């Protein structure tokens, strides 16, 4: 699809046909790409694609873009990518500190009657070792040494506590994946 002909069709009377053509040609490809590369849900990908088409249309109608050197797909996907990044930034602001990771909820408390306590502890430590730094350091500072996000940011020289909070969440997700691959369901193994 030639970009210049699309611009002309949208500016003139062929806008509905041009937009339908763009929508049907790139929708499924964009959704699959968004889910695969940006870890969003199907619904989020559909919404983002619709937003990208609207922005594409408005950029042409309001003459924010009169000429571009890329293909329609490239331009449309770049709009979509920017919207996906906005969505991810917004989601990371609202990341709950707890309840996202079953290990935190299931805490491994010492119980003298629990013969498997040492084994459970070794499993978690083995997964922590596989996790590597900086994740291992962040989680150890937070859970083992009971340090605040601000203290961890200062010790590990991060910009601020929000950076550490986001990293901690991502590290917990990675730890959960490692544990699940190695041992199966987290709640079954730790409880």
Image (cartoon, grey):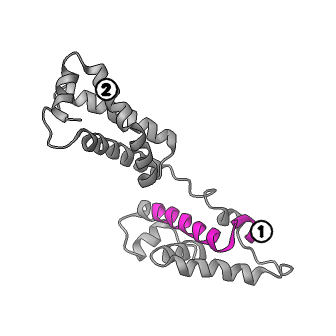
Residue 77, percent across and down?
31, 43
Q: Residue 75: x and y, percent?
A: 25, 41
Residue at the far right in the pictured view: 113
- Quadrant where the N terminus sits is top left
Q: Residue at x 29, y 41 (%)?
A: 79
For numbered disc 2, what is the local secondary structure? helix
Look at mark 2 in the image and give the residue it sits on.
Answer: 19
In this rendering, the answer to whether 123 lies above or below 189 is below
Element carrying mark 1: loop
Residue 88 pos. (x, y %): 42, 49
The image quadrant that residue 24 belongs to is top left
Indicate whether residue 184 is drawn in magenta.
Answer: yes
* Residue identifier under label 1: 191
Q: Quadrant for residue 5, please give it.
A: top left
Q: Is residue 18 found left or right of 161 in the rendered image?
A: left
- Residue at the location (67% across, 79% down)? 123
Task: Give how far apart the Cα atoms at labels 2 and 1 are.
Answer: 54 Å
Q: Earlier in the sequence, mark 2 or mark 1?
A: 2
Which mark is on residue 134? none
Please identify the quadrant where the C terminus is shown: bottom right
Report the front residue among 54 and 87.
54
The answer to the question of whether label 2 and label 1 lie on touching residues, with beta carbons closer than 8 A, is no
What residue appears at the point 69 percent right and 62 percent down from the top-left corner? 105
Instruction: Please say if 191 is above or below 124.
Output: above
- Which span of residues is magenta-colored? 165-191
The part of the image, by quadrant, that contains residue 140 is bottom right
State which mark lies toward you, 2 or 1.
2
Residue 66 within the magenta-colored segment of the rendering: no
Dot 1 alpha-carbon crowd within 10 angstroms: few under 14, some 14 to 19, many 20 or more: few
Say above or below: 34 vs 128: above
Q: Nearer the viewer, residue 42 or 190?
A: 42
């Amino acid at each position: 699809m030639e970009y210049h002909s699309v611009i002309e069709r949208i500016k003139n009377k062929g806008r509905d046909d041009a937009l339908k053509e763009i929508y049907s040609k790139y929708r499924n490809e964009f959704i699959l790409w968004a889910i695969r590369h940006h870890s969003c849900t199907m619904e989020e990908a559909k919404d983002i694609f619709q937003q990208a088409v609207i922005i594409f249309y408005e950029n042409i109608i309001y003459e924010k873009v009169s000429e571009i050197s890329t293909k329609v797909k490239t331009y449309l996907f770049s709009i979509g990518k920017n919207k996906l990044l906005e969505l991810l930034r917004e989601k990371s602001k609202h990341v709950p500190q707890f309840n996202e990771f079953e290990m935190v909820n299931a805490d491994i408390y010492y119980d003298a009657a629990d013969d498997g306590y040492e084994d459970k502890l070794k499993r978690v430590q083995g997964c922590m070792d596989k996790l590597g730094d900086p994740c291992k350091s962040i989680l150890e500072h937070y859970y083992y040494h009971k340090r605040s996000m601000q203290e961890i940011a200062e010790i590990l020289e991060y910009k601020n506590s929000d950076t550490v909070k986001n990293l901690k969440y991502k590290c917990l997700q990675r730890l959960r994946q490692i544990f699940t691959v190695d041992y199966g369901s987290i709640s079954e193994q730790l409880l």
